[in-house]
Amino acid sequence: MILGRFFNSRFFEGITKATDVLLIGFYFIICSLPVFTIGASTTALYYAIHKCTFKGKGYTTDFFRSFKSNFKQSTLSWLIFILLFIVLGGDIYITRNMLQPDNPLAASSMFFTVLLAFMVVWSIYHFAYIARFENGFKASFKVSAIIMIANLGWTLLIMAIVIAAIVLVYLFLFLYVFMPGIMACILHPILEKVFRKYMTPEDLAAEEEDLSEI
């Protein structure tokens, strides 16, 4: 009886969810090692956290189902984003290290830094969008960009959270192992709040029906 209460308790449920989050984060790290698969891994990370952790349905291995089904679109998207990151990173390096301080263009390094930060947040919106909705390749880029700009307040909050996470991992390198799943859990409520504003009544009804079955 006591053992049954323990396994049905919120404490045990919390431990189970925490374990699932860490396991999904581990899947993300392993599947991201080839680098070019980071986009597909990010999409799968958000999908698995949404379905397994927040909706309480499915299994952590749903990560791999999303990874496979969204691999092509997410990988192509990631290659575009990584190209943008490299270009902006190069601009930052040049304006900071290869120009004289009195050069008017030297100050543009701050502009490129801010632009890079927005690109990172755009990629987060984009891969979360792919995980949650079915849309074409070009349309997904367009819609995720519009959503990011139209919700500037939430976008800035996401940016602040990402910067804080990067600083923490820089100071405490061991946190890298735990950070993917934790970050997905932190950002999920924000992204879902934003996404729900653009969901059709049919989509919202389906979401409520799924929740009522939990």
Image: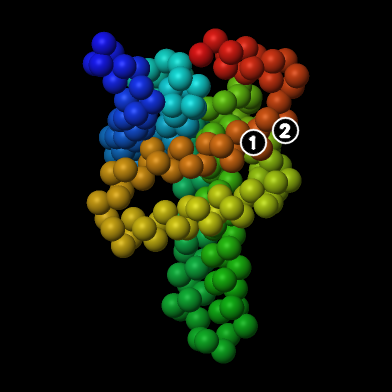
* Residue 163, position as x, y percentages in the image: 47, 58
| Secondary structure state at the residue bearing disc 1 | helix
Furthest residue in direction bottom, as rendered: 102
Q: Identity of the amino acid at label 1? A: Lys
> Identity of the amino acid at label 2?
Lys
Q: How far apart are labels 1 and 2 at the CA level?
A: 7 Å
- The percent position of residue 101, horizontal first and vertical second, equals 52, 87
Q: Secondary structure at mark 2?
A: loop
The residue located at (58%, 63%) in the rendering is 114
Q: Residues within 10 Å of mark 2 (few under 14, many from 20)?
A: few
Residue 198 in the image, given as x and y percentages of width and height: 72, 30
Pointer 2 residue = 197
- Regarding residue 84, the answer to whether it shows in the image is no
- Please tell me in which quadrant of the rendered image residue 57 appears: top left
**Residue beneath label 1, please?**
193
12 relative position to 182: left or right: left
Q: Quadrant of the N terminus?
A: top left
On screen, residue 124 above or below 134: below
Give the camera-side residue of 151 and 185. Answer: 185
Name the residue nearer the viewer: 99 or 126.
126
Q: Is residue 70 left or right of residue 32?
A: right
Report if the CB atoms under discs 1 and 2 are less than 8 Å apart: yes
**Picture residue at 61% right of the left edge, 55% below the top:** 156
On the rendered structure, is 72 left or right of 11? right
Residue at 69 percent across and 41 percent down: it is 147
Rendering colour mode: rainbow
Q: Which mark is residue 8?
A: none
Spot occupied by residue 112 in the image (x, y as percentages of width and height): 57, 65
Looking at the image, residue 95 lies above or below residue 122: below
Characterize the local packing of mark 1: few (<14), some (14-19) or many (20 or more) Cα atoms within 10 angstroms: few
In the displayed structure, 81 sits above or below 185; it is: below
